[in-house]
């Protein structure tokens, strides 16, 4: 049996081309989410501590300016709370809840694409394998003789599609779960520190 030319298989397989595009999308959106979440994360105790010192010194405007320039999601939630600090506690708490939901939506942006890649890539690869095997048996029927040696190369080439699907899906699924965990953790932190902000401001 001749050697299998992976480059040639790639060129002739529409399925592998689709999987290649999926892999590019996965890498691009994973990198974008990593940079965004890294920028949006912050030590909540340190951030709230600095804000508390400014408020204790009567520097509300300075605190708002500091928070407005901070890239963290929690900073935007606290800034929103300070901007509406004169409201009643129930109203302010509800507004902070909407701010947290808004920030969570920003954190979860594009994660659906990674989840879709992780779920669909194996099926795309399987589809390519099935098509490849059908082609291999068609070649066997046309050849008439040769037995397994005729289809062995074709089946081996078809299985490359399944391997490609898994190669795309596994990292995408791992990254999706990782980012979802980060988003959940950051959402919980925003809820905790926004509640502490309410207590700190003595909202009634």
Image: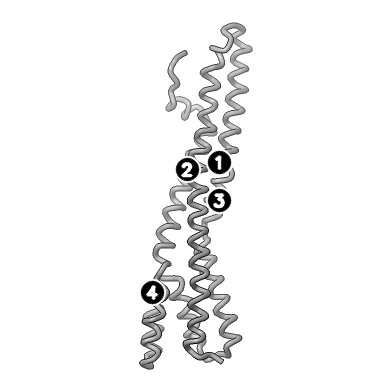
Mark 2, secondary structure of its residue: helix
Disc 1 versus disc 4: distance between alpha carbons? 38 Å
Please, what secondary structure does the residue beneath circle 3 have? helix
Secondary structure under the numbered disc 1 in the rendered image: helix
Residue 129 position, x and y percent, is 58, 29
Within-10-Å neighbours for mark 2: few <14, some 14–19, many 20+: many
Q: Residue 70's mark?
A: 4
Q: Earlier in the sequence, mark 1 or mark 2?
A: 2
Q: CA distance from mark 3 to mark 2?
A: 13 Å
Residue at 58% of width from left, 43% of height from top? 120
3 relative to 88, above or below: above
Q: Is residue 199 above or below residue 38?
A: below
Residue 23 tag number: 2
Looking at the image, is mark 4 or mark 2 earlier in the sequence? Answer: 2
Give the vertical position of 181 relative to 143 (above or below): below
Compared to residue 130, the image places residue 185 above or below, namely below
> Which of marks 4 and 3 precedes in the sequence?
4
């Amino acid at each position: 049996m001749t050697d299998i030319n992976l480059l040639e298989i790639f060129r002739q397989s529409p399925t592998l081309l689709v999987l290649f595009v999926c892999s590019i999308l996965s890498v691009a959106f994973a990198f974008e989410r990593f940079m965004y979440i890294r920028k949006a994360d912050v030590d909540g105790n340190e951030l709230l501590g600095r804000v508390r010192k400014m408020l204790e010194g009567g520097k509300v405007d300075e605190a708002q300016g500091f928070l407005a320039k901070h890239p963290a999601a929690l900073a935007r939630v606290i800034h929103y709370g300070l901007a509406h600090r004169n409201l009643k506690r129930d109203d302010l708490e509800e507004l902070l809840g909407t701010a947290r939901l808004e920030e969570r939506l920003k954190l979860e942006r594009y994660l659906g694409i990674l989840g879709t890649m992780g779920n669909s890539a194996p099926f795309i690869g399987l589809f390519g394998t099935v098509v490849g095997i059908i082609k291999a048996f068609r070649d066997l029927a046309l050849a008439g003789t040769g037995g397994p040696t005729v289809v062995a190369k074709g089946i081996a080439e078809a299985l490359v599609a399944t391997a490609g699907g898994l190669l795309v899906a596994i990292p995408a699924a791992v990254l999706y779960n990782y980012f979802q965990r980060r988003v959940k953790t950051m959402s919980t932190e925003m809820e905790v520190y926004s509640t502490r902000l309410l207590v700190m401001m003595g909202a009634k």
